[in-house]
Image: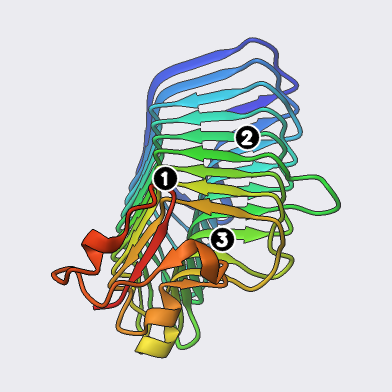
Amino acid sequence: IILNFCYRVLVNDCIISSCTGTNLTLVNLTSCNLCDIVNVTVQNCVGSALTAFQFSSGSNNTFLNCTARNNSSTGIMIGYNFNTSILATITNCLALSNNSSANTCTDFNSATSTTGTYKQCKSIGNTGSTAMTAFNIVGAGGVGDQCTLIDCYAIANSATGAAGQSTGYLVNTANFGTLVRCAALYNRSSASLAIGVSFQGGGGTNWSISDCIVDRNFGSSAANSFGVRILAGTNNFFTKTIAFNNNTTVANQLSGVPAGSVSTPAATATSNIASITLPATNMAIAA
């Protein structure tokens, strides 16, 4: 399905299945405005590089109840690629069991796209070799800011290559974003880092992260396992976020989050939990 320079087009109730080829893009919107992609599934497709859904250089488009499932690639694998778009709304979309056997897998890729909203989107059981990223929020020079993620899940994704990092939510040079009631659970890397929420590269500033849960993300060792890891960015606000059992290093549960806003109970069964009375406190608990 290809839409170029379209206005107010509805694509509804479609299944794209078992396609093969090189550099596949199965649903592609370019310079479209006010279009709706609803109940569209891309499944069982194989390509040397594969993108299930792509939207570039347009505005005010919506994706609702879409699925990218069981697609595979030897090259780059992307579920949903939003490139230089504005005001995209992605609601209840799923990336399930997609795989790149020799390259990166990214499920929801926001590349220099501004004011995008992701609500109830899910990345579950996907695999990348050189990297696995569920939600990739990347900006540049003020483009790519103001992304909002609400009630989204990154669950049980894996990086399998020798230096493959597995990340639930990656923020790089993107600012003024919001992460609310999101979860990063059971993500794995067999030989490198596993991180629930990562601010890396250019990081991000003026983000609000609230009511999130980041549990049981396991890298190749305790030192390579993080709940939240902030390497770059300033003036970010964390509240009521819980990082639990991201391996056994307490300092890695909420790494880079200001210490004054973090409580570190010794274990879930101790009286230390009862001593946490401030409702805005973030909690870091090792296994």
- Side of 27 relative to 244 (left or right): right
Instruction: Please tell me how crowded label 2 is: few (under 14), some (14-19), or many (20+) other residues with Cα within 10 Å.
Output: many
Residue 75 showing in the rendered view: no
The type of colouring in the image is rainbow
Residue 237, position as x, y percentages in the image: 59, 52
**Label pair 2/3, CB-CB below 8 angstroms:** no
Alpha-carbon span between mark 2 and mark 1: 29 Å
Determine the image quadrant of residue 186. Answer: bottom left
Identified at 45% across, 65% down, the residue is: 262
Work out whether mark 2 precedes mark 3 in sequence or the reverse, and give the earlier one.
2
User: Which marked residue is nearer to the observer: mark 2 or mark 1?
Assistant: 2
Where, quadrant-wise, is the N terminus in this rendering? top right
Residue at the disc numbered 3: 170
Residue 168, position as x, y percentages in the image: 44, 60
Where, quadrant-wise, is the C terminus in this rendering? bottom left
Residue at the disc numbered 1: 19
Q: Nearer the viewer, residue 80 or 227?
A: 227
Residue 187, position as x, y percentages in the image: 34, 67
Alpha-carbon span between mark 2 and mark 3: 15 Å
| On screen, residue 171 above or below 245 | above
Q: Secondary structure at mark 2?
A: loop
- What number is the disc on residue 116? 2
Badge 2 amino acid: Gly
Residue 263 showing in the rendered view: yes
Instruction: Please tell me how crowded label 1 is: few (under 14), some (14-19), or many (20+) other residues with Cα within 10 Å.
Output: some
Work out whether mark 3 precedes mark 1 in sequence or the reverse, and give the earlier one.
1
Q: Which residue occupies the extreme top position in the image?
A: 8
Identified at 36% across, 87% down, the residue is: 222
Work out whether mark 2 precedes mark 1 in sequence or the reverse, and give the earlier one.
1
Q: Secondary structure at mark 3?
A: strand
| On screen, residue 78 above or below 133 | above
